[in-house]
Amino acid sequence: MSMDPSMGNGTASVAEVTGTLEAAYPLAWAEAWDRVGLVLGERDAEVRRVLLAVDPTVEVAREAVAREAQLLVTHHPLLLRGASFLPADEGKGAVVTTLLRHGTALWCGHTNVDRSTRGTVGAWIDALALQDAAPLVPGELSEEAAHGSRRFGLGAVGSLPAATTVGALAAMIAQEVPATARGILHTGDAERPVRRVAVCPGAGDSFLEAAIMAEADVYITSDLRHHPALEHLESAVEPSAVPALIDVPHAASEALWLPIAQQLLAEAQPGLEVLLSEHTTDPWGGHAA
């Protein structure tokens, strides 16, 4: 009988759990501008329960405390742009105050996780069942890490097991990712045929040209702004000359990593209880048609 990866009855230290994460997702894999690793907490503190989330928001910090997690692990950094002041009546200050007051540590993984076959890019390769997957941005050296993790690169391109359409692919993605108020957007004709797919979890409009060069039928990413998306579509008179676009809400696109991290920690730290956040951190709560 397989064990539920969330269940556990053992303990570890913050250093041991974060060491597992950093062995699978080396901090050296992160972009130079990124801020990944242990942000808050004592390395020798005991951990019985871990909470996984996409963003370290005030609501998520309160959830970690309410669910008695000694360690919060998030994909996005808390202090990516730095901060000089952290008063408790402002968001980031409230997160820091809440976590430290209750003895909850915080570890953030970002672009180091994005590059891994057991990270966000690997989650999307698995979700789409991409065949012959290759990095969307070529040139990165493959590197083996621990716990079945391998440095793959940013984004991926490959072929679907069977041809589909833009509309059908968007509908399938909507079933795979957490539901959001906005849902999944796509450009152009919903019946446009699709076989070759490019994907970049998170904000990926800087890789629009890479998706064209990869000869993808569709490019899946997040945070597509009006002008870059429109200029991409208008770069050729014939719509089929450039990839169609599917826009997935940012937090939803990266939430696919959380069950992978849950399983990784459960495998590496038997007995540790690893929970998934019950809150969406997508900022939009509703829409009007």
Image: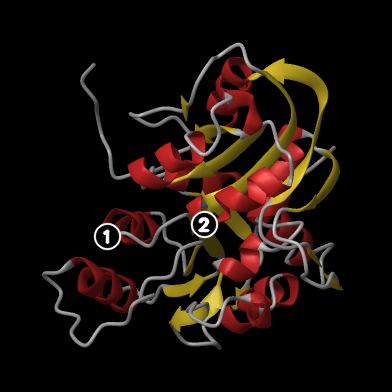
The correct choice, above or below, for 20 with respect to 223 in the image is below
Closer to us: 281 or 172: 172
Closer to us: 115 or 106: 115
Q: How many marks?
A: 2
Quarter location, residue 118: bottom right
Would residue 262 be visible to someone looking at this image? no
Residue at screen point 72% across, 49% down: 156
Measured as percent of width and height from the top left, residue 185 is found at 45, 27
Q: Pointer 1: residues within 10 angstroms few (<14), some, or many (20+)?
A: some
Residue at screen point 14% across, 79% down: 87
Could you tell me how far apart the alpha carbons at marks 2 and 1 are, in whole angstroms? Answer: 30 Å
Closer to us: 64 or 132: 132
State the quadrant of the C terminus. Answer: top left
Inspect the image, locate mark 2, and give the three-letter code of the amino acid beneath it: Ser
Q: Is residue 189 left or right of residue 261?
A: left
Q: Is residue 92 left or right of residue 185?
A: left
Of circles 2 and 1, which is in front?
2
Q: Is residue 34 left or right of residue 225?
A: right
Residue tagged by mark 1?
58
Measured as percent of width and height from the top left, residue 243 is found at 62, 34
The correct choice, above or below, for 260 with respect to 245 in the image is below
**Element at badge 2?**
helix
Residue tagged by mark 2?
206
Residue at screen point 53% across, 25% down: 174
Measured as percent of width and height from the top left, residue 2 is found at 81, 40
**Which label's residue is closer to the chain start, 2 or 1?**
1
Inspect the image, locate mark 1, and give the three-letter code of the amino acid beneath it: Val
Q: Pointer 2: residues within 10 angstroms few (<14), some, or many (20+)?
A: few
Q: Is residue 244 left or right of residue 96?
A: right
Quarter location, residue 162: top right
Quarter location, residue 15: bottom right
